[in-house]
């Protein structure tokens, strides 16, 4: 059974979880042949090669990031394939899993299960003092044993076993989770976030600490950053993943003044390098 772990990660949390899942599933080569890929390096057409997808994303504004939504809008219709969905979040995912499941279901995928996992909020981290309690907690958390993800991978293995022994994928499919509270609290929260993000996007700039190493240009998942006449220029396609801010070696990229001198996150183990995935 061929399974693809397909995901987007702005700053390393979802990448860490995707690799964690991969490592667990690799222990069952007789049932699952697993591959790991980011949506930045995958065209939706490639998905037909796999029996099961395990799709991961970070929650942004109680939804998936715009880059994920664009990818999902271009899915190709398929039959008898299944999808598991996982997301990482700082606090609250609302109905993000359900929103991501929808385009999959519309294109013929059977929804097989999901898992949300709380990780450090990378939006807040970039605005917090390096010595704050939240930063300390994020750095000290035990990322080696994530019980909810262990249970999630057990469920994936269990379903893969059932499918390889002739089980019908439609019988195994379920309804995506629905949180009624999110339909009430979600919209005002979402509106507030949208307003904040609208103004924040206009305030991206590089300070004079910038060494023009071009890492931000190479790393941006939507090619929104360029260099023009010794200036770092931010276009209007930003998906707010904050990768440029957290990855800049000179900590030169800022949103106005709120990120100046504040903490930078390099993933749960401090080793996230998005460009390792370049083809
Ligand atoms: C622009 C932005 C919006 C976010 N919105 C939410 C949110 O609505 N709810 C939440 O729980 N976490 C939110 N987060 C936190 C991220 O979901 C969380 O840190 C995630 O693990 C980041 O994953 P990544 O490192 O793979 O990008 C947001 C982060 C960013 C950058």
Image: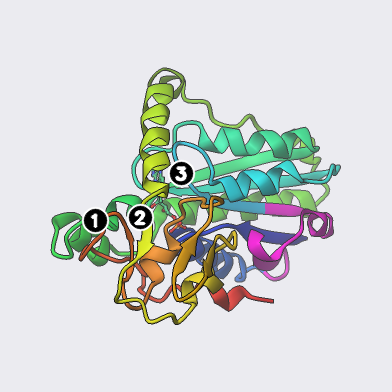
Q: Residue at x 20, y 66 (%)?
A: 261
State how far apart marks 3 and 2 are (Cα).
10 Å
Q: Earlier in the sequence, mark 3 or mark 2?
A: 3
State how far apart marks 3 and 1 are (Cα).
22 Å
Q: Residue at x 32, y 77 (%)?
A: 250
Q: Which residues are magenta?
A: 29-53
Q: Report x, y in % for residue 244.
A: 43, 65
Mark 1 = which residue? 257
Label 3's element? loop
**Along the horizontal axis of the image, is 205 left or right of 273?**
left
Q: Residue at x 69, y 44 (%)?
A: 72
Residue 122 bears which disc, if any?
Answer: 2
State how far apart marks 2 and 1 are (Cα).
17 Å
Name the colouring of the figure.
rainbow
Question: In the figure, residue 114 lies in which quadrant?
Answer: top right
Q: Judge whether 78 appears above or below 260 on screen.
A: above
Q: Judge whether 82 appears above or below 23 on screen.
A: above
Mark 3 = which residue? 60
Q: Report x, y in % for residue 143.
A: 35, 64
Quadrant housing the N terminus: bottom right
Q: Are marks 3 and 1 in contact (CB under 8 Å)?
A: no
Q: Are marks 2 and 1 in contact (CB under 8 Å)?
A: no
Q: Residue at x 34, y 51 (%)?
A: 123
Look at the image and say whether residue 47 sits in the magenta stretch.
yes
**Which residue is nearer to you in this view: 194 or 89?**
194
The mark total stands at 3
Label 1's element? loop
Dot 2: few (<14), some (14–19), or many (≥20) neighbours within 10 Å? many
**Which residue is nearer to you in this view: 166 or 169?**
169
Whether ligand 1 has any atom under 8 Å from the Cβ at mark 2 is answered as yes
């Amino acid at each position: 059974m061929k399974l693809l772990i397909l995901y987007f990660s702005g700053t390393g949390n979802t990448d860490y979880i995707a690799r964690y899942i991969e490592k667990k599933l690799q222990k069952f080569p007789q049932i699952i042949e697993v591959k790991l890929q980011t949506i930045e390096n995958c065209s939706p057409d490639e998905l037909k090669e796999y029996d099961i997808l395990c799709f991961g994303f970070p929650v942004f504004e109680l939804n998936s990031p715009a880059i994920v939504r664009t990818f999902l809008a271009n899915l190709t219709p398929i039959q008898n394939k299944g999808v598991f969905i996982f997301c990482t979040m700082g606090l609250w995912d609302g109905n993000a899993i359900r929103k991501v499941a929808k385009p999959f279901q519309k294109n013929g995928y059977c929804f097989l299960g999901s898992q949300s996992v709380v990780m450090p909020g990378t939006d807040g981290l970039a605005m917090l003092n390096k010595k704050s309690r939240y930063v300390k907690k994020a750095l000290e958390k035990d990322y080696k044993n994530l019980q909810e993800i262990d249970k999630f991978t057990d469920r994936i293995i269990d379903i893969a076993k059932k499918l390889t022994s002739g089980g019908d994928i439609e019988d195994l499919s379920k309804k995506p989770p629905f949180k009624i509270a999110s339909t009430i609290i979600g919209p005002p929260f979402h509106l507030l976030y949208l307003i904040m993000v609208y103004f924040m996007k206009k305030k991206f700039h590089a300070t004079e600490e910038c060494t023009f190493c071009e890492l931000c240009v190479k790393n941006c998942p939507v090619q929104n950053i360029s260099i023009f006449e010794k200036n770092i220029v931010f276009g209007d396609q930003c998906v707010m993943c904050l990768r440029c801010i957290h990855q800049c070696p000179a900590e030169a990229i800022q949103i106005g003044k709120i990120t100046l001198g504040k903490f930078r996150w390099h993933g749960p183990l401090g080793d996230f390098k998005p460009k390792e995935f370049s083809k």
